[in-house]
Image (tube, helix red, strand yellow):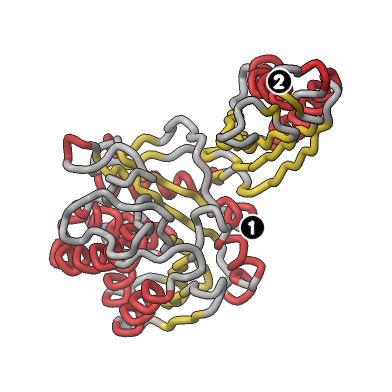
Amino acid sequence: MTHISPLLLADQHSDLTAIRRDIHRHPETAFEEARTAQIVADKLTSWGIEIHRGLAKTGVVGTLKGNRAGQKTIGLRADMDALHLQEKNDFAHTSVVANKMHACGHDGHTTMLLGAAKHLAANPDFAGTVHFIFQPAEEGEGGARVMIEEGLFDRFNCDAVYGMHNMPGIATGTFAIRTGPMLAASDTWTVKFKGTGGHGAMPYRGTDPTFVAAQFIGAIQGIIGRNVPPTQAAVLSVGHIAAGTYGSPNVIPSEVLIRGTARSYTPEVRDLLERRLGEVAAGIAQASGCEADYHYLRRYPPLVNAVEQTTLAVEAAALTVGRDKVDPNTPPLTGAEDFAFMLQKKPGAYIMIGNGGTEEGGCNHVHSPLYDFNDSILTTGAAYWVNLVQLELGDAS
């Protein structure tokens, strides 16, 4: 079985574009992707692919067996959910749902995997089984974790799993990946500093948590600069501060709430960030006669690509677009992905596909109200999936 290029799927492009834009126009957020899941289920069923529904509420798994004997099974995963964000585009397929939009390209991810499923269903000349995993709730709600907890790999065993995400800012027709940690762990931390508060003109009569909070915000960057080894990487950022009342600027508040994110790539650095944030908060609070309530929530683990599956992913990408258009050692990204939960359970690889930049009519940033998935790469992504299946379960020489 020979490999395919995106050109061999050109007859699908208009249909895939229509599907993608329809999903974009009707975005659904975490665990509410009923309409999107129905589109997926209907398409898979029409192509003769067995479907299973209900994992993580709206998840869909399609199962396709090749027409040659083989026991190996792989999973291909696409996410379906949108973001809580008001779209600012004005094209015909702009979101019709207030404060919801596909600002990360999951509409494209779903469509690319559907394109691959259609082709493979019509050309099942491979040995083994493919599970097409359409996952809800990637954006912060851990839909991958929920699917696993509800029996994803018990019901649909996979010898390996693969994921793909579009990457604005890198050229269309290119791919990027790396072995080992590729995306960071994403954790959320919260500190509430408690003092007595008091009159703004007489701060000496009480304890001032705003002074403590200000020192803390500056001090936590010392964790990065003086505790994290310079050969490793980590990020601590403050994303929310709440204190006092706008109408009473002469009142020192009794509490200040600070929330932020922590990003890391290794268990050791993750442990260090959790420990040192608490120590710094407690120490600064105590020095000023205040208290600190501290909570650290581990959300998504680091995404770690396995060596064997990354090698196969690189080869599949090279078969799709040419070896010179595949970066096999792209720098790690500080973004996070709940596909990491699947990679904790099964060996696999996660690859980036170029979505282009503004010069190609796209947007340079995901999670932007001006973002849109680049429809020109729909057949490129679908061809990658097909070539990957051929490498894993057949002959793509």
Instruction: Determine which quarter of the picture holds residue 295.
Output: top right
| Dot placed on the residue nearer the N-terminal end, 1 or 2 | 2
Q: Residue at x 74, y 30 (%)?
A: 277
Q: Nearer the viewer, residue 341 or 162?
A: 341
Count every numbered label the image shows and give the total: 2
Foreground tag (1 vs 2): 2
Instruction: Decide if residue 180 is in sight here.
Output: no
Q: CA distance from mark 1 to mark 2?
A: 45 Å
Q: Could you tell me the amino acid type at mark 2?
A: Phe
Mark 1 closeness class: few <14, some 14–19, many ≥20 residues within 10 Å: few
Q: Residue at x 18, y 67 (%)?
A: 12
Q: Residue at x 24, y 40 (%)?
A: 356
- The residue pinned by badge 2 equals 211
Quadrant (top left, top right, bottom left, bottom right) of the N terminus:
bottom left
Instruction: Decide if residue 133 is in sight here.
Output: yes
Q: Position of residue 175 (x, y in %)?
A: 33, 42
